[in-house]
Amino acid sequence: MTSNTSGKIFNFTTWGESHGKAIGCVVDGVPSQISLSNEDIQIHLNKRKPGQSKFTTQRKEKDEVKILSGVFEGMTTGHPISLMINNEDQRSKDYSNIANVFRPGHADYTYWAKYGIRDYRGGGRSSARETAMRVAAGAIARKIISHKLKNHYQITGALVQIGSSKINYDNWKNEFIEKNDFFCPDESIINEWESLIKKTRKEGSSLGAVIELRCKGMPVGLGEPIYDKLDADLAKAMMSINAVKGVEIGNGFESVSKTGISNIDEMRIKDNKPFFLSNNNGGILGGISTGQELIVRFCVKPTSSITTSKKTINTKLEETEISTEGRHDPCVGIRAVPVGEAMMATTLADHCLRYL
Amino acid sequence: MTSNTSGKIFNFTTWGESHGKAIGCVVDGVPSQISLSNEDIQIHLNKRKPGQSKFTTQRKEKDEVKILSGVFEGMTTGHPISLMINNEDQRSKDYSNIANVFRPGHADYTYWAKYGIRDYRGGGRSSARETAMRVAAGAIARKIISHKLKNHYQITGALVQIGSSKINYDNWKNEFIEKNDFFCPDESIINEWESLIKKTRKEGSSLGAVIELRCKGMPVGLGEPIYDKLDADLAKAMMSINAVKGVEIGNGFESVSKTGISNIDEMRIKDNKPFFLSNNNGGILGGISTGQELIVRFCVKPTSSITTSKKTINTKLEETEISTEGRHDPCVGIRAVPVGEAMMATTLADHCLRYL
Amino acid sequence: MTSNTSGKIFNFTTWGESHGKAIGCVVDGVPSQISLSNEDIQIHLNKRKPGQSKFTTQRKEKDEVKILSGVFEGMTTGHPISLMINNEDQRSKDYSNIANVFRPGHADYTYWAKYGIRDYRGGGRSSARETAMRVAAGAIARKIISHKLKNHYQITGALVQIGSSKINYDNWKNEFIEKNDFFCPDESIINEWESLIKKTRKEGSSLGAVIELRCKGMPVGLGEPIYDKLDADLAKAMMSINAVKGVEIGNGFESVSKTGISNIDEMRIKDNKPFFLSNNNGGILGGISTGQELIVRFCVKPTSSITTSKKTINTKLEETEISTEGRHDPCVGIRAVPVGEAMMATTLADHCLRYL
Amino acid sequence: MTSNTSGKIFNFTTWGESHGKAIGCVVDGVPSQISLSNEDIQIHLNKRKPGQSKFTTQRKEKDEVKILSGVFEGMTTGHPISLMINNEDQRSKDYSNIANVFRPGHADYTYWAKYGIRDYRGGGRSSARETAMRVAAGAIARKIISHKLKNHYQITGALVQIGSSKINYDNWKNEFIEKNDFFCPDESIINEWESLIKKTRKEGSSLGAVIELRCKGMPVGLGEPIYDKLDADLAKAMMSINAVKGVEIGNGFESVSKTGISNIDEMRIKDNKPFFLSNNNGGILGGISTGQELIVRFCVKPTSSITTSKKTINTKLEETEISTEGRHDPCVGIRAVPVGEAMMATTLADHCLRYL
């Protein structure tokens, strides 16, 4: 009943605080004889790493991961893989002035009420810094999926909305996603988003975002009824990411305004294999994958760390105000893209090991 | 790793098929010395029971629950509570003509692909009939919450949208919810919804819906970081309900088009206690309850069982067509209201026992 | 975290009290497409059934099992299998005189102290009647093992000691075990055991026993380091049986008086396959099966229900005395044989599904 | 379903290989606001540390533990505590000559068969070096028990038998246990044990041992029926320790040769509280603690690493012989004492958090 653990067969347990000595995780349930190197993990960490663009936090972390166990001569051994990243750029002093003040919109007050402890250093355990280890675990998950499927599959995450500005799906280009600071698939919207973020930052505010995750190449049959349905596990995985307030599969909330006639995915046969004439259900029926592309969206609320002063209280239950001057993302949704991809990978790896 | 079990400390395991002899569940983790009678459970089952209005399925089931263990002289003993409902109105013959055909939009194809078995009798295990046991377990969960909190709390579920027709939140009246066939809190929209359902049924189609769940009276501190956050567990619970395709907390997807300035819930002190000036976050921050009202919404796709003929395939991988003539809900979202309430109750009971 | 559940992938949850309406269990994690009938289960229940010989309790229970779910047209569906046995011969009146008295040596006092409830009817949930459902689950476990291994394997349980009287291992005959009332493999000791039990009963006392379980045909590789070792899981399974006070693997406690030189199982090659020159380790090394015969022993303390009067206390914390006049086994170890076999089967089935 | 994790509410996950860079564990489920320092843990690690006496391995490890997370300003935060010990004296070269040979009596062959990997460096993950982290987790468990009970309790582990030489229980002195190299409570037997070990070492052999664990001060009510009984969990915990082949509670196997009359622990009242006239059941009835002293014994087989040559095979399935020249314990049972104490502490801490 470890609440810091995600997954059942493939699973990982994260530890560490934003401004502690290090953060890390223990990845368990990994089959033996899969090749695994630091680089396999680092490549994904680098996508999420802070300090890379003017649109994300300026905290500088190399985020260099070390593999401490579970790999022998370049191959997994079947035993727990311990990963660690040293924290380097912890400017805890930035936080000393808020040592007793709860930042509104953050977990400061709820953690204090629950644990009776105020770890003011950058949110402590509740910081999104924890998500670095999700990305690391996700990199191992990807190796497991490849190992089990023995064929090509592809997870693609992209930002499809910032504030009220949505992409045009007709412009979607996978290859463009990695070429811009927003993980955006629609080149035509980049200028608008840049202006929007600059403007919002100047106003001392922040923006929310919607992230879409897709996965091609999964077989039919992933997911366990009744309570470990694939969509239920994906929903939990996404909702566990910092600042996420909603998750949907396929057409999601839009399916409500459709009718049964238009929303049902009809089936046909091609080359002796079943296929679907549409994918309104996002590749999941009855909680089990259909073999179609999986489609998941989740939304991230506007960053709660803003430079505008907001009303709040402190640990003495006095009223006060706060504005956040630290190094923060104007839109945490951007860096949530690799985190969402990672959580999709860990969920799929777990279900691959449960089913295949 | 029982995929038919929901919950960690308070938990329940359901069993049974739509057209088997019976359905049931085993509820475990219930503290001793809580009064519990058949009536405590039956009252909630009656809300979900089929055959009650012209807007839901005409299948007639008394849904009379029997308590087989775990209660002695009217009090819980701390041991597993076994509940059972006999199936009575199983017209399996209704299904014999689709014995080899997969109903599109249902789990028929995915279950067959995963298990190699075609239990054609009304969806077998994948049927929403399973949700009766969720409602039964939810009734016990409510007793536990009362027992732990020792004060008043209230779970309210309501239908807030059918098709494209949304309620006016200004008209919300809790007391009206139980007085109409839709669990609708807005009296002014009833006529519109009745017409909409009749029209859709006549067209051989069906409708989706959005359900909103609220819970007043929960303390601050429920939820376990990082992966068993209260919102993550609620998301999983809701997404595990048949036909659900999306879940959101508080402002949910709407928070994306807000800015940080407007979306942050500011804090003040009243009577020496913290309170919030708004509830955009739906009563959860950092995955932990704030003590405010909890607000969750989930959507149900349009019922896949419709009388219009749709393209599909059969177990011999031949192309065919199907229309569903059985007794079905034109909008399964209606009966999802008590199910959603029950899943909220079981999730909260579990977290109450984990924290309090 | 259901404490009434045993197993991880293959698992079962039992419910019911000795004198309630029924007892039952839900067996989950069963692969689909395995043939399963009532008879497959009943045959094992009949071995454990009370009232069969003068050496066990005279309570008469038909112990007729009903399969309520999870089986369709004679085959498992992959969904939970619900089993139920109605209680028929509950003479709860036998217990009314002890309604407030704790039977010493039983769980009466500890259950009352823990739960604040005194279910006096034959021990309620703590009764060994619960083990009937272990035997039922064990029968399904055996089908799973056959299904996974696709070859012959054999679980053999036998009584090897009653009181101080041990069998002569040189006389061990598997085929004799089912031919006597003691599940004894040594024909030469039967008369002695009969006399011993008669004499002990006459003295108003009872006897302990040692049960030995063997399993041939398991592959190398079952068991999960570090904490779910095969021997650790077997130890937990056996120790969870009523009245069991010790468990050992292979030479067990006798290995202490051996030296490393004599206790190491040396290895050789025959027909290109590894084999061992001895089996001091009972077929388990480092928590993982070696492919040799598995050997487990556990001991059962003398039955605590005896006709001799013993000092005890009651729920008012007054001193009193008690003697038990009900229908009891003079040596519960006898009926523990099929229960031990069942727990070995469920543990092995779980590990087969985890590994194979 | 992490097999490298022990415990449910209080739990710890260990990682690391005997000759890897480091070993560590993540301890989760620790309540907040408990004082915790490196010294609290180090004091217990020092008891188990190798290289301390001529009767244990000569490997030199400082075993200096580092706390990497979960503690803020000297107090636990309620978040995972990550502990790490760097490996320093890894003479992996000592093992290069056995890179392809399976040491008989060890897990070498079973691990290779299961994982397809031969990590020859001192047993890799199967090494007893892993138990250092159990001792570290046990130290935290002790702090939790104190925190929950708010009164005195005491766990005492002692060696009561080496080879065939058993202590005289009449000579038991708790205060002597820490004053000798054997954790022996009986001063009169020390000379005999010293001679026995020297003689056995000279003969190129090794010795088994029996360890007895006692715990005073636990309340009535710990343990969860039916499958997470306190004795069942203790049995699993002890059997999971390297080289353990048997576990017993209270009179254990000796209870078999007693009768019900003599083995039942009778009850009386003193100062308005229940007490028992004997403790044959080792403080556990029906799987639940009685409030008496807990008594557990487990046996450790003779060390399998001996200097006498033994028959074995290698990874090419060729026959060969092996003798172990490394730095090994002639009786691993000695260093198993602090490990057994730790596993008792972790099991009790888990049950304290489940019940209290």
Image (cartoon, coloured by chain):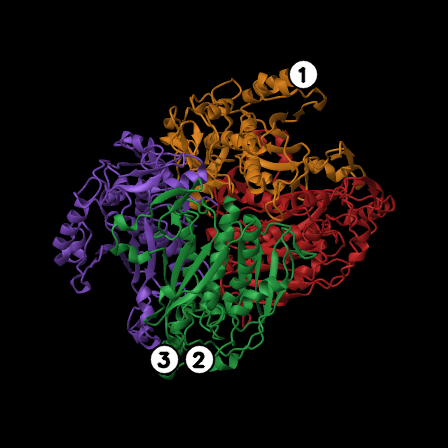
Chain colours: A purple, B green, C red, D orange
Circle 2 residue? B98
Query: Could you tell me which chain the residue with mark 1 belongs to?
Result: D
Question: Which residue type does callout 2 highlight?
Answer: Ile
Q: Secondary structure at mark 1?
A: helix
Label 2 vs label 1, nearer the camera: 2
Q: Is residue D228 left or right of residue A80?
A: right
Which residue is nearer to you in this view: A48 or B197?
B197
Which residue is nearer to you in this view: D59 or C106?
C106
Question: Which residue type does callout 1 highlight?
Answer: Ser
Q: Position of residue D348 (x, y in %)?
A: 57, 36
Query: Could you tell me which chain the residue with mark 3 belongs to?
Result: B
Within 10 Å of disc 1 (Cα), the crowding (few <14, some 14-19, many 20+) is few
Q: Is residue C134 above or below residue D78?
A: below
Question: Which residue type does callout 3 highlight?
Answer: Thr
Q: Can marks 2 and 1 be said to lie on one chain?
A: no
Query: Could you tell me which chain the residue with mark 2 belongs to?
Result: B
* Residue D188: image tag: 1
